[in-house]
Amino acid sequence: MAKLLGEVLTWVVITLMVGLTTVVVVAVIFRKAGASLSWYDEVASVLLAWTTYYGAALAALRRGHIGFDDVLLALPRRARAAAVIVAEILVVSFFALLAWAGLEVLSILEGETLVSLTWVPVSLTQSIIPIGAILFIVAELLSLPDYWRDVMAGRSVEHAVMAHGATPDKDQA
């Protein structure tokens, strides 16, 4: 399941980045030609936000966010286990709260549209808040078993990411 989610998130992020790059390049060409696009700023901002949220979920799945593995690994095994549990509870709780707040924001924005593209509802553009938060939680939980195994075995996920660009496969660990 984690591998499938990783593949899907990778392609979503690539697609969003290509889309954002295309919008920016097209907008620059039009501006240089003296015909600025009225919708460029809003669309580029939305694509950047979506790229950020989906990319954050992908990084969570790969355990690529900033961490303190050296500090964690310096702790005795029991304290290390407690620290991982507390950290996971805090992260999942934060993103659950973010998802809830995002849903509240969507209800407040109901009926609003983008300024330059009046046919696009703002709730669609802002739906990434709860979607991204839920994806982050799913990614965090799917990656937890391998992370737990590595931390309890005294292996640093942080160093594996820096050395290889991704977390080690089960075969390499």
Image (cartoon, rainbow, N blue to C red):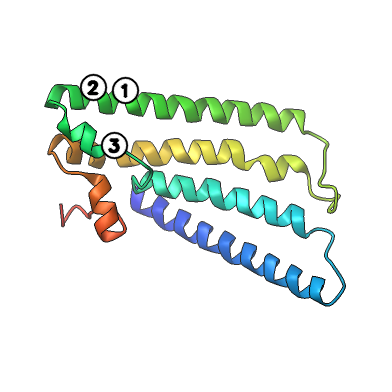
* Amino acid residing under circle 3: Phe
Asked if residue 159 is positioned above or below residue 86 in the image, the reply reads below
Q: Decide: few, some or many residues near mark 2? Use Cα within 10 Å; few <14, some 14-19, many ≥20.
A: few
Q: Is residue 98 left or right of residue 146?
A: right
Q: Which residue does the numbered mark 3 point to in the structure image? A: 68
Q: Decide: few, some or many residues near mark 3? Use Cα within 10 Å; few <14, some 14-19, many ≥20.
A: few
Q: Answer whether labels 2 and 1 touch (C-beta < 8 Å).
A: yes
* Amino acid residing under circle 2: Ala
Visible in this render: residue 1?
A: no
* Amino acid residing under circle 1: Val
* Separation of marks 3 and 1 at Cα, in angstroms: 14 Å
Q: Is residue 84 left or right of residue 18?
A: left
Nearer-the-camera pick, 159 or 84: 159
Please give the name of the residue rendered at 70% of the width and 33% of the height, measured from the top-left corner.
106
Nearer-the-camera pick, 115 or 2: 115
Say which mark, if any, is on residue 86.
Answer: 1
